Amino acid sequence: MKKSVALPARMAQLKEGKLFQWYSANLSRGQIFVKLFIYVFLSVVAFVFVYPFLYMVITSTKSVNDLYDLSVNWIPRSFHKENYTYAWKMLGYPRHFLISAFLTGAGVTLKVLCCSFIGYGFARYKFFGKNLLFFMAILSIIMPVQTILLPQYLIFANLQWTGSYLPLLVPQIFGYGLKGGLFIFLFRQFFLNLPTSLEEAARIDGCGSFKTFWRVALPTVRTSVVVTVVLAMVWHWNDYYEPSIYLNNAQMLPLPSMLPQVKAAYDSLFGGAIDATASNAGALVSEGTLMAAIFLVVLPVLIVYAFLQKKFMQGIERSGLGGD
């Protein structure tokens, strides 16, 4: 009797065990499909962002004949290095690279020093008009540069600063300039999250306000400094709008501002019908030359970002820009 009762119970346990195993197997398969879908989706999205860069690099190596040959798509028949030679000469690369490096280096240095100092003041000190000034700093992020370009130009023209680099550098000292309000906000948020015990200990040891900021506060926000350096470097290097407004001498233009000249030469040659098989086709400013010029302009930014990528991502995570 006991044996007959125990047998159905044992069968039920086996069924439950098999059911559990089946459920676990199907659950793991479902997770695999979910992960596979995520990877495929992210790969498609990544390709959308990477495609323009791949198009630029591949097109920069094509000759005029390859550009007009429908059978040549991703792999050119030969590496046409003349595109880079022409682009190098048309950009005046050595001279204008040094100008861009100077403007970018000076802009990044002033951004780090001045915006961190202003952000520290907003985070640690109470003074009359603090909220109003901080609101104006945030407003400078929202307000497009084009809306106040004319008043700025008139001010700099009255000061006789146009035709020089002063309109591009002097506003950085006051935390204004290119995206200055954003960096003030970032530094303020970092300093607000720091404990005040280290600063209080420094003041007890006899450090003044400036020494406390320089020796204690600023070194503790290295991640925010890296974020500021990378973002400011990209924005200053790629900026050609303001230099084209304030600089009227082509010899003083930074490197990105030389790209319209390459584009104008390309339009003058390829604006109408052209015979790609002409004998002088190799000497033409083709689309490959234009893409080579763009690649030479963005190459320094890519190199610097490759070295600072890890610290930059850490700074993004700690600043809260990357989301939850």
Image (spheres, helix red, strand yellow):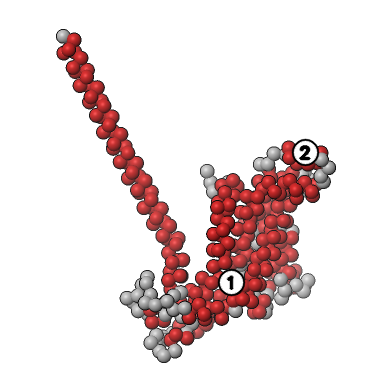
Which residue lies at the image location 66% right of the left edge and 72% below the top edge?
A: 99
Q: Is residue 26 above or below residue 132?
A: above
Q: Amino acid at mark 2?
A: Ala
The part of the image, by quadrant, that contains residue 247 is bottom right
The part of the image, by quadrant, that contains residue 238 is bottom right
Residue holding disc 2: 201
Residue holding disc 1: 256
Q: Which residue occupies the extreme top position in the image?
A: 1
Q: Is residue 287 visible?
A: no
Mark drawn on residue 164 = none
Label 2: element kind: helix
Q: Is residue 93 visible?
A: yes
Q: Is residue 257 above or below residue 175?
A: below
> Is 289 displayed left or right of 199 in the figure?
left
Q: CA distance from mark 2 to mark 1?
A: 47 Å
Label 1: how many Cα within 10 Å (few below 14, some 14–19, many 20+): many
Q: Amino acid at mark 1?
A: Pro
